[in-house]
Image: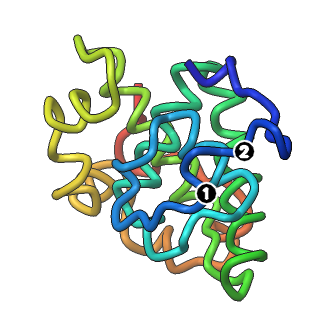
Amino acid sequence: MYHKLNTMSCTNPNPWYAKKHTHHSQFSDIEFIEAFEKAVLDPKLFNHEAHLRLAWIYLQNFGEQKAIEKTCSGIKHFDIVCGNGDKFHTTITVASVKMVRHFIKKSKSASYFDFIEEFPQLKVAFKEILGQHYSPEVFISKKAKVDYIAPDVLPFD
């Protein structure tokens, strides 16, 4: 589980460090979180599904509010270190965590990969799900990028 993260040292190097990963699924949850939080995860691997996995892991370990905080601060940091620092969108990120939480409450899955198999719509119809909760105008507003705006069409719970 995520809480059992070991610290890295010269005598205890990370086994994934020298590997060439081509997909985030090649990391264990612990390795994935560690690489993400240290911003050493290849940005090409941090796709939409990896964002969902991040939310799932944080929700499993910290509950909704702390998962939102960690997801937002983590993605902002990752964007600054690995990108241009201009891609983070608060409302989309918070809404994503809330959507993952909604489906976790219905899930029988013990792993992220079983979870996403159980609810593939999060992966393949994410924009459509967001559209059930928000009008399109919300996402183009500058306020929504910086501050969380609650759904204006249908609440999450």
| Residue type, numbered disc 2 | Pro
Q: Could you tell me residue 35's position as x and y percent? A: 64, 53
Examine the image and state in which quarter residue 142 appears.
Answer: bottom right
Q: Residue furthest top?
A: 108
In the image, taking residue 129 as reference, residue 23 lies left or right, namely: right
Amino acid identity at mark 1: Tyr
Residue in view at x 76 percent, y 36 percent:
12
Residue nearest the viewer, comparing 64 with 8: 8
Residue 135 on image: x %, y %: 37, 64
Seen at 66% across and 60% down, the residue is 75
Does residue 95 lie above or below 83 as drawn?
Answer: above
In the foreground, 20 or 34: 20
85 and 140: which is toward the camera = 85
Q: Which residue is mark 1?
A: 17
The quadrant the N terminus occupies is top right
Q: Which residue is mark 2?
A: 13
Task: Tell me whether the residue at label 1 lies in contact with that at label 2, contact meaning CB atoms closer than 8 angstroms.
Answer: yes
